[in-house]
Amino acid sequence: MAENKLNLLQDFAPVSTETWKAKIVADLKGADFEKKLVWRTPEGFNVQPFYRLEDVKKLRTTVSAPGQFPYVRGTRTNNEWAIRQNICACDNARKANKLALEVLNKGITSLGFCLKADKLNYRFIKNLLQDIDARAISINFTVCACHAPELARILVRYYGRQGWDIRSLYGSINVDPIKNMLVKGKDLSREKVTERLVEVVKAAKSLPGYRVVGVNSVVLNNAGAYCTQELAYALAWGAEYMTMLTEAGVPNYQAARNIRFNMGVGGNYFMEIAKFRAARLLWAKIVEAYKAPVFTAALKEAAKMNVSAETSKFNMTVFDAYVNLLRSQTEAMSAAIAGVDEITVTPFDVAYERPTDFSERIARNQQLLLKEEAHFDKVVDPAAGSYYIETLTNNIAAEAWKQFLAIQEQGGMFEMVKEGKVQDAVAANLKTRLSDVAKRKEILLGSNQFPNFTEVAGKKIKADAGACSSICNCKEPKKKEAASCGCGEACEPALKTLPVARAAEEFEELRLATEGSKHQPVAFMLTIGNLAMRLARSQFSCNFLACAGYKVIDNNGFKTVRDGIKAAKKAKADIIVLCSSDDEYATYAPEAWKILSKEAAKTPDKKHPLFVVAGAPACMEDLQKLGIENFIHVRVNVLETLKSFNNQLLK
């Protein structure tokens, strides 16, 4: 029997892009292709509904290899990233050391220690690092910038006494004056910033594996910045430090290899993968610009962008908090696929309490699952060749570069921070994102869409929410509060600071206000008429109103409007939502309004239920003329509507 062989290339004729698009347009049945299927991203460019080989043929990102300049496909020939956990060592070195040893036995390969300047001395570091083998893991420190050189010298001394080859050790000291300007409002001079950078680079010269200059664009991500905005500012930030160091006489390769990028990872899965790929490409090109007189092998090696990624706090929620695990997991996946050097997963409960042993354990295990079960560490740049991600990488690189050039034209990152322009731009972006959350253009499952109807959260919110670890009582500074670093230097804010917010906060405030009221409002669905429409609209309305914590009562349907109102009164409804079809509203809505208005006129001193129509029927204008004011549908601002209801119901 002859064997039939299928040859896809020969047996199926190629289909052109024009043919595909013509078929799509025909299936749209008159709908506009651009409006229906082309996505205008918040990052500033359009995304097509499909991509083909012809879209990536001319892209440079498809011809490079992992570990080769300009490093778009990664700085390594493996994908073995470090799993990081941060530990506060602000007060108790031995307690921090005990926790560090515990987590090292549970899969952690990178430690981050937060230190207080007034506690810093050799004995403290010795107690902190006792029995920790710095040759096997990455050790990272955050301390006041003016004490970072002292820390570097202590580490050189301590590591040397262990008999280790200190040149082979790796880690970081996170010195980032611009971050202090953005977050704490410190008004620093350019000379002071340069002085601090140069001093710590010189102090850490014996630790070439340590990167001691941080670019902490994660603070922008946590303030609501989109991918291209965070990337553009991060690049300008790093370029500012390169310029400061090289102008102060630090060799170009030494300046570049001392810079580490601590970046955030947002919830836009594919966009974040592309962001990190674009970041490596652009940073390599920026470092190349410092090549004078020649582009040496040392500088080309130093142009490898070192990225520590941290999952976002911006989209963490108090309500339905276990959904935070899904958010942080996809974010960690984005970072891992993109080939970052290190990942920190934010514990799921950080929005409402100091992270617990349980939440930190889950955060560790999220990365272990990606390695041990999903094998994400076995393939370098698995996104390579994807028409979609290659195109996104190119688009993000182009948009971020355009923004980077605009920053340079305005004097660079330092000057823009001094003038408050960066803070204003991020605040404007935050305002847009919060508006999108309010209108459900940006979805936060469990908060502004599909809430858990019966959940209460007020009692689980702790006063120490936001503390940096399970053993720490210190918190990130809130908005413009003064922060003390323990160095004796004035820390009162003098510059504008970045906004501090989470996307879900305003919805949470609504729901917590309902929880704290003496009476939980009851929303009753008066379902009548067309079966499909009344069911769809009652489900929509229940989800809509439950976002404010109201008790919702759905119904199968009523034969008459009067029957529905009678049942609503029996249920002691505070809101009556009429759920029917657009055509039937012209009859049912006036009838219901007339009955309710008569009852209200009879007892004017009594509180009467709000009347709401679910939908935006063609007869809306006529209904409004009758006095019906409340309509809920997909185009309304959910947050503002619920605020209005709360103002009327929670008095």
Image (spheres, rainbow, N blue to C red):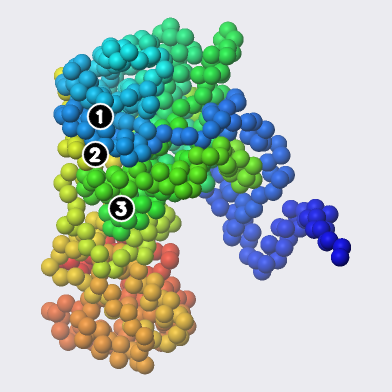
Q: Quadrant of the N terminus?
A: bottom right
Q: Is residue 607 visible?
A: yes
**Residue 219: percent from left, percent from top:** 35, 35
Q: Amino acid at mark 1?
A: Cys
Q: Which mark is residue 317?
A: 3
* Crowd around label 2: few <14 · some 14–19 · many ≥20 (10 Å): many
Image height check: is 343 above or below 15? Answer: above
Element marked by disc 3: loop
Kind of residue indicated by mark 2 = Ser
Residue 471, percent from left and from top: 19, 38
Q: Earlier in the sequence, mark 1 or mark 3?
A: 1
Asked which quadrant contains residue 561, the reply is bottom left
Residue in view at x 21 percent, y 59 percent:
457
Is 425 on the left-hand or right-hand side of 571?
A: right
Labelled pair 1, 3 in contact (Cβ < 8 Å): no
Residue appearing at x 30%, y 59% in the figure = 320
